Structures are given as structure tokens and as C-alpha cells.
Image (cartoon, grey):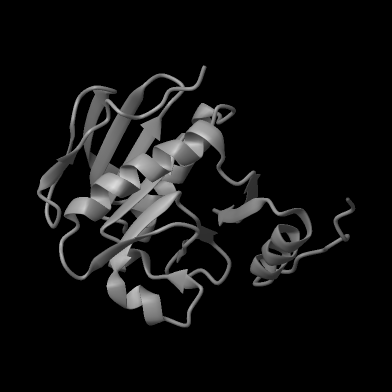
Amino acid sequence: MTVPAMHPRPGNLRTVAEQIEKATGLRVEILGGSLVMSPTPRGKHAGTIRRIRQQLEARMPGGLAAYEVTSLAMPGDPDDYCTPDLVILPEAWDTDDEWLADPTDTELAIEVISQTEKARRITDKNGWYSIAGVRLLLVVDPRFGKWTLYSHPRSGSYHGELEGEYGLDIPLPGPFGFTVDSGCLPRYA
């Protein structure tokens, strides 16, 4: 498969990302002005998302819903956007015509680390979510059987951080007020 040659101009990077996504089927994000491409989740990665989603949907507060393949815009930047594995937004998103959600409407973003993920990229993405104003970020890492819940975004970083291993419940603060069982999440071989 050949991807067409593209020469992005400022303010046009989003168009380039959309063309790459269409031509390759890869998931494309723009983080801090850089194109980040990854395959769509499958296997244990997708299974982790499914198991978390089932638990959330069983106890979700009224007016909220879980969405996959939903991208969040970086406020004030015409290009930057990120696509978490799972995001909790107001149910009104069902009838929204926009393709990018407002990150300040996001109650929880969930990222499942891929087998090939690099540590620097993980840290950069966490900073992106904080700068965008996402209140809660749950990072689940099937490579090591660990999870981290980030909260209180301010000045480009999260000031609340709770870490745990698979088997320990993940306590989600308001508006959730319940825990997620991490013991049922699969680990990469």
C-alpha cells in the first residue's frame, strides 16, 4: 500500500492525519504537533478495553456513557487531538455532529498500553491529557500488570497519582464513586 506524498502546512496537519488514517487503517493522533500512528486495538489490548467498559457501564452514573474511537481536541490548537482507548462523556455526545469532543467534558479517559509502547511516549501522552484538562486519566499496562489513575491536572501535569497492580481494585472518585476490578484484566505474554 502506498501512502500519498503530503506536505502539511501549519493548520493542515489534521487533514494529513485523516488522509493517513483513511489510506492505512491505522489510528492516527496529533500530539504536540507530531503525528503518532498505531494499529487499532486487538487481542488482549481490545479485551482489556472491553472488560473495563463492561464494569463501567454496569455502574455508570446517569447522563454519562462510554465511547471508543472518540477523539478529544486540544483546546486552542486547530491540529492537536488524541484518541483514548475509552472515554467517558455526557450521553449528549450521542447526538453531537462534531468529530472531536471537548476534553473538559471528559469525566475519564482510559489508555491501555500496547506491547510495543515506549516509555517516553507514554509520559508525553499523559502530559497532553493534563494540558487539555482531562480530569481523570486511567493508564492500564498489561505488559507489567499495573495501572495508574491520574487526577488533578494543572500546569501540564497531573498532581494526583495512584498506582496499583492487577488484583487491586481501581477506586474511581466522583462522579463515579465505585471501584473497577483489575484482577480480571489480561496480561500480555
Q: Nearer the viewer, residue 177 or 18?
A: 177
Dividing the picture into quarters, in which one does residue 80 lie?
Answer: bottom right
Eyeballing the image, is 72 above or below 145?
below
The image shows residue 13 at horizontal and vertical percentages of: 67, 65
The image shows residue 102 at horizontal and vertical percentages of: 38, 70
Image point 78% across, 59% down: which residue?
Answer: 23
Instruction: Give left or right: position of 138 versus 60.
Output: right
The image shows residue 140 at horizontal and vertical percentages of: 37, 34
Instruction: Give left or right: position of 182 versus 141.
Output: left
Q: Nearer the viewer, residue 52 or 148?
A: 52
Q: Is residue 157 visible?
A: no
Image point 52% across, 61% down: which residue?
Answer: 81
Eyeballing the image, is 173 above or below 139?
below
Eyeballing the image, is 167 above or below 45?
above
Dividing the picture into quarters, in which one does residue 5 lie?
Answer: bottom right
Q: Nearer the viewer, residue 70 or 135?
A: 70
Instruction: Give left or right: position of 67 versus 115.
Output: left
Q: Is residue 168 visible?
A: yes
Image point 40% across, 52% down: which residue?
Answer: 86
Eyeballing the image, is 78 above or below 174?
below
Label tally: 0
Image point 29% across, 72% down: which residue?
Answer: 91
The image shows residue 7 at horizontal and vertical percentages of: 82, 63
Instruction: Give left or right: position of 74 versus 134.
Output: right
Q: Nearer the viewer, residue 133 or 169?
A: 169
